[in-house]
Structure formats: C-alpha cells, structure tokens
Amino acid sequence: MDERKTYNISLIGRSFKLSSSENEEHVQRVAKMAENSMSETMMLDKRISFETAAAVTALRFSEEIIRLQDDLTRLRRELADARNKDT
C-alpha cells in the first residue's frame, strides 16, 4: 500500500497542502514547475488572476501529457514493428 504524506507547498504566494506517495524533493519539483508556468502566464498580463493562471497551467500540462502519450504510443508501435521485422 502506498504510504502517503502531506506536504506544504506554495504557489505564487499561496499555501497549499498536497498529499502524495512521492518524496518531498519530487513534490517540490512539481510545485516549482507549476509555479513557474503560472508566473509566466501572469507576467503576460498583470490582470490575469491566480485562478486563471492555474487553469491555463492545467491546460498546458494536460496538452503536454497527451502529446507525450501519443509519442509513447507511436514509439511502442515502431518498436513492435522493428521487432517483428527481426523475427
């Protein structure tokens, strides 16, 4: 069973509690990546709210995950095809 721990993270000056089975270093890396993305969004227009920046960040990360999943599927297919040619 995964042992989950609760971590305190900060995003753009706001504090949150995050429960994760990952170690603290990993959780802090994730939080830093999210904060950097949100900061970039908020710098584009000073009127962008925290909530809007969070939503834009979630959409960007979702898009990247889908792109990576598609790449992984393609690479797995190519690997399977290459293995089939060798046999």
Image: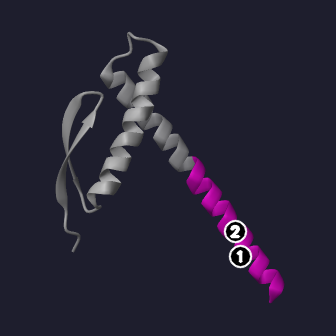
Boundaries of the magenta span:
67-87
The answer for how far apart the CA atoms under marks 2 and 1 are is 5 Å
**To which residue does mark 1 refer?**
80
Q: Quadrant of residue 56?
A: top left
Quadrant showing the C terminus: bottom right
The answer to whether residue 42 is above or below residue 26 is above
On the image, the x and y values in percent for residue 64 come to 54, 44
- Neighbor class of circle 2 (other Cα within 10 Å; few <14, some 14-19, many 20+) is few
Residue type beneath disc 2: Arg
Residue type beneath disc 1: Ala
The answer to whether residue 4 is above or below residue 46 is below
Residue lying furthest front in this view?
25
**To which residue does mark 2 refer?**
77
Left or right of 44 on screen, residue 12: left
Labels 2 and 1 touching (C-beta < 8 A): yes
Q: Residue at x 63, y 62 (%)?
A: 73
| SS assignment at label 2 | helix
Q: Residue at x 22, y 29 (%)?
A: 14
